[in-house]
Image (spheres, rainbow, N blue to C red):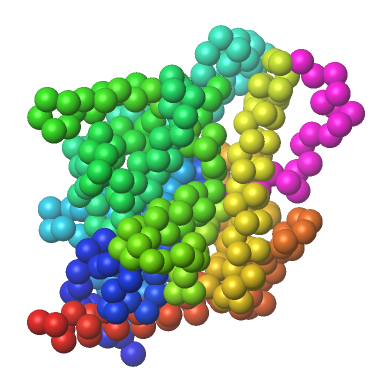
Amino acid sequence: MTAACGCMNPPSLVKFRSKEKNLITILSIDGGGIRGIIPGVILDFLEKQFQKLDGEEARIADYFDVIAGTSTGGLVAAMLTAPNPNNRPLFAAKDIVPFYLEHCPDIFPPPSWGILGQLASLSKSIAGPKYDGKYLRYIINEVLKNTKLNQTLTNLVIPAFDIKLLHPTIFSSFKIGYNPSLDAKLADICIGGSAAPTFLPSYYFKNSYDVSNSREFNLVDGGLVNNNPTLLAMIEVSKEMMKEDESAHKMHDDRLVVISIGTGSAKKEEKYNAKMTAKWGALSWVLDNGSSPIIDSLFESGADIVDLHNSVLFQSTHSQPNYLRIQSGRLGFADAGPTLGRKIIELDLNKSGLVTTPSCFGPTRPKTISGWVMSPTMLAERLSEERRYRNAQNAAVI
């Protein structure tokens, strides 16, 4: 039965230790360039489940206390949480895939055909970034305009790396209260946080705040911090909870429910091996057959370490059903082209093996959603129930 979509306070206005919450909900979206289409498909599926339960106006941002995203995941997160003139999400989840299909061919134009075209592309990649980033900057500014981090409809966490300071910069809704220099435009945050070395140019901007103050940022892709931002979001929540209650000593709360969405893995491609890489110099590690082995390795290993940590954490607290990692073993880096969206759309989410079980040792083992302890459909039901509980608590106060 479809219920009416009731109004509620944005999740960001509800204290984590408040009795108004049975759950603390986190959505995390990996980086991956054009493969942001993959979480777009999954989030569309999830949002449709919410709409079946709570009405057509239900949106992803209504159900998560924190949404974190790295690189392209940060852009998806910003699109889902930035407000429109009616103070509702600027984009529905169903709009993400069409956005990528429409604009990615201009953001990542395919190389020219023929030997001369390939030589020109190779020469350009050696001399500078593979793509100039101009259209990416244009379309992100066009979509997000002047919306700032403090205006999002729920808490947002987007990592980037400051190449001048050689230090991570975490743009977090939780930080801007005591560090207003981080309250930048979402467009600047997303452009800087997705500037993958060798692929897109680094991004400089100056953020003015407090009337007379400003801060300079020199940013590259947040994947250098971590391509899977789940742990960053969990840390932000833990710090906030400890601020609310100084006596709190646990870094993990049993109410924590986390869904972490990947953008495909290159593992099954087995593109590299020791025999191949043994003779490589600096150039080959940076550029090989159109990809960057060192960047691939950094991003993959970082995401895996986070998944490993979360797997152990949730298993050690006997709360495995509260952690869902969705990753595609079928769609890897070689699929990073405009046809990817159509390819994954053809997959049946319930039968495609997109869900992987957390594994403490060795590679993750693909499992169908039906074999997992918490499917996206079950997750939607839990979060819908939580939303109704919060609505009832708010109504009781009024």
Magenta region, main secondary structure: loop
Residue 139 seen in the current view: no
Residue closer to the observer: 315 or 269: 315
Q: Quarter-wise, where is residue 247 in the image?
A: bottom left
Relative placement, left or right, of 165 versus 141 is right
Relative placement, left or right, of 138 versus 150 is right
Q: Which residues are magenta?
A: 263-281
- Give the residue at the far front of this rendering: 247
Which residue is painted at 34% across and 21% down in the image?
204
Q: Is residue 271 magenta?
A: yes
Q: Position of residue 393 (x, y in %)?
A: 22, 83
Which residue is painted at 41% across and 66% down in the image?
248
- Give the residue at the far bottom of this rendering: 1
Relative placement, left or right, of 325 versus 136 is right
**Viewport quadrant of the C terminus:** bottom left
Residue closer to the observer: 47 or 116: 47
Q: Position of residue 236 (x, y in %)?
A: 40, 53
Q: Please determine whether, in this image, residue 161 is positioned above or below residue 48.
A: above
Q: Position of residue 37 (x, y in %)?
A: 48, 50
Which residue is painted at 20% across and 53% down in the image?
83
Q: Please determine whether, in this image, residue 17 is positioned above or below residue 173.
A: below
Relative placement, left or right, of 110 versus 286 is left
